[in-house]
Image: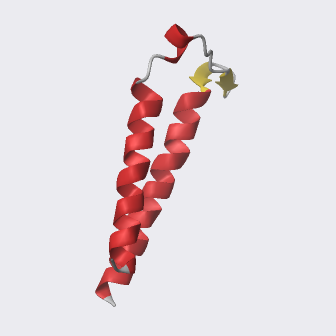
């Protein structure tokens, strides 16, 4: 397996983590995510912040994968 394929597999793994993070009913199993106030009037749960960061990382791996695959 070459480097471009490894990067692609990591992106697939990250997408599964994002889906589980967003779709799993955390409150039903007794885990309450902290809520942060953004700009004074927007309430945002921690799971959305984590999912956003992971999405950015996955997007960057797409860019890197393209550069590596073209070489």
In-image side of 15 versus 51 (left or right): left
Q: Position of residue 24 (x, y in %)?
A: 43, 23
Q: Tell me which residue sits at (68%, 24%) in the image.
A: 36
Of residue 37 and residue 40, the one placed in the foreground of this image is 37
In the orientation shown, which residue stands out farthest toward the front? Answer: 1
Q: Quadrant of residue 33?
A: top right
Vertical comparison of 59 with 34: above or below: below
In the orientation shown, which residue stands out farthest toward the bottom? Answer: 71
Q: Tell me which residue sits at (45%, 16%) in the image.
A: 25
Q: Position of residue 55 (x, y in %)?
A: 45, 48
Q: Quadrant of residue 65?
A: bottom left
Q: Tell me which residue sits at (43%, 65%) in the image.
A: 61
Vertical comparison of 2 with 9: above or below: below
Q: Quadrant of residue 20?
A: top left
In-image side of 42 versus 58 (left or right): right
Which quadrant: the C terminus? bottom left
Q: Tell me which residue sits at (67%, 21%) in the image.
A: 34
Of residue 50 and residue 40, the one placed in the foreground of this image is 50
Vertical comparison of 66 with 37: above or below: below
Q: Position of residue 21 (x, y in %)?
A: 47, 32
In-image side of 51 versus 10 (left or right): right
Q: Position of residue 27 (x, y in %)?
A: 54, 11
In-image side of 20 versus 46 (left or right): left
Vertical comparison of 25 with 10: above or below: above
């Amino acid at each position: 397996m070459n480097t471009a394929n490894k990067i692609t597999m990591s992106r697939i793994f990250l997408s599964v983590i994002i889906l589980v993070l967003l779709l799993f009913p955390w409150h039903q199993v007794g885990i309450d995510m902290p809520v942060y106030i953004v700009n004074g009037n927007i309430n945002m749960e921690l799971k959305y912040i984590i999912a956003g960061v992971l999405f950015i990382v996955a997007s960057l791996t797409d860019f890197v994968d393209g550069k590596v695959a073209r070489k």
